[in-house]
Amino acid sequence: MRAALLVAMTAAVLAAGCEREDRTPPAPARAARSDTVTLVSLQPGGASDAVRTRNRYEENAAAVSEGQRLFRFYNCSGCHGSFGGGGMGPPLMDDQWIYGSDPANIVGTVLEGRPNGMPSFRGKVNDDQALKLAAYVRSLSGLLRKDVTSSRTDSMSGPSRASPEVPKDSFMPPSSTGQQ
């Protein structure tokens, strides 16, 4: 009896000490536009300070994982490699960023495209999805905290409680959205 009471009390203390990540996504906000970020130091009228933006999804492992899913869904790996290692497009795992590694630069690249190969995804990717993609892309090069980045995809973590978000103007088979 005494041993059972001791085990129950130990389990209660351990359970009270566990802290779980908040997976409630923040309310969607508009993405930062690339026209507010300095891409190069050459500016008319003299040099200006680079604008640093913050992506609220960079501190949420579930959002970074969603960015990883979107990276696969939009076939970003077709040009950038499965895990950002490069291919036709530039590698995303190094520290060489032509258009900048700030979240606003990455969102601008996704939405507006870039010359010589990067298409614009405006109209296919909404601002919220672009921020999640930016968070995932920054995680590939080690720009996020290690506890936010995932070592495996959420599909390997077990069944999901929420149905996946279907990107605008896209087709997902009924079996992958949980609908019949």
Image: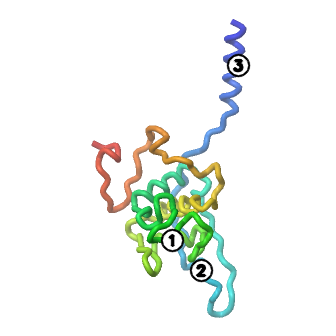
Q: Are marks 2 and 3 in contact (CB under 8 Å)?
A: no
Depth check, mark 1 against mark 3: the one in front is 1
Q: What residue sits 51% from the left and 62% below the top?
A: 84
The earlier-in-sequence mark between 1 and 3 is 3
Q: CA distance from mark 2 to mark 3?
A: 58 Å
Q: CA distance from mark 1 to mark 3?
A: 55 Å
Figure quadrant of residue 64: bottom right
Amino acid at circle 3: Met
Residue 39: mark in rendering: 2
Residue 165, given in percent of the width and then of the height, sits at: 41, 52
Under circle 3, the secondary element is helix
Between residue 136 and residue 90, name the one nearer to us: 90
The residue singled out by tag 3 in the image is 9
The earlier-in-sequence mark between 1 and 2 is 2
Residue 44, given in percent of the width and then of the height, sits at: 62, 92
How crowded pointer 1 is (Cα within 10 Å; few <14, some 14-19, many 20+) is rated as: some
* Most distant residue in the bottom direction: 45
How crowded pointer 2 is (Cα within 10 Å; few <14, some 14-19, many 20+) is rated as: some
Vertically, is 59 above or below 119?
above
Amino acid at circle 2: Leu
Residue 90: mark in rendering: 1
* Most distant residue in the top direction: 1
How crowded pointer 3 is (Cα within 10 Å; few <14, some 14-19, many 20+) is rated as: few
Q: Are marks 1 and 2 in contact (CB under 8 Å)?
A: no
Q: Which quadrant is the C terminus positioned in?
A: top left
Residue 88, given in percent of the width and then of the height, sits at: 44, 71
Q: CA distance from mark 1 to mark 2?
A: 17 Å
